[in-house]
Image (tube, grey):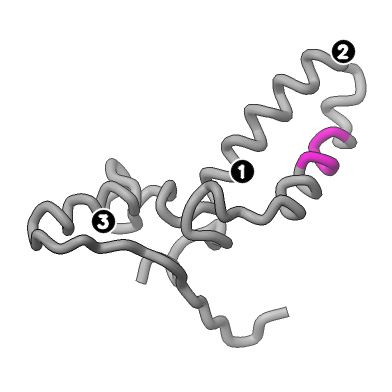
Amino acid sequence: MHIAATVPTPVAVSIEDVPAELIAEEKRVLMESEDMADKPEEIREKIVSGRIDKFINERALLEQEFVKDPDLTVGDRVKAAVAKIGENIQVHRFVRFQLGAD
């Protein structure tokens, strides 16, 4: 339910799994954006670095705010389920189907 209901759509389970090509493309777009044109290089790097960190966290499933409780991340919710059930629950992958996709 979470994967179907969230925007932006997660592209990976964890931060480490977000594709490097996607990160590189987002960094390129951010560096070339109009609001960065008049800033010094070292300031641009810091701003873009912060925006990239946010971008990655928004695209990693376990880092996203849980759709039913925004005070928790999906990772926190999984840990809570592990504590309650006593089983080692891990998310290895997910699939999202979308009708009328581009």
Q: Residue at x 34, y 53 (%)?
A: 74
Report which quarter residue 82 is drawn in. Answer: bottom left
Q: Which residue is mark 2?
A: 40
Q: Give the main secondary structure of the magenta stretch.
A: helix
From the viewer's perspective, is 17 left or right of 93? right
For numbered disc 2, what is the local secondary structure? loop
For numbered disc 1, what is the local secondary structure? helix
Q: Amino acid at mark 2?
A: Pro
Q: Amino acid at mark 3?
A: Val
Mark 2, residues whose alpha carbon is within 10 Å: few (<14), some, or many (≥20)?
few
Query: Which residues lie in the magenta part?
Result: 27-31
Q: Residue at x 32, y 62 (%)?
A: 90
Q: Nearer the viewer, mark 2 or mark 3?
A: 3
Of marks 1 and 3, which one's residue comes earlier in the chain?
Answer: 1
Q: In the rendering, which numbered label is found on residue 55? A: 1
Q: Which residue is mark 3?
A: 78
Whether residues under marks 1 and 3 lie with C-beta atoms below 8 angstroms apart, the answer is no
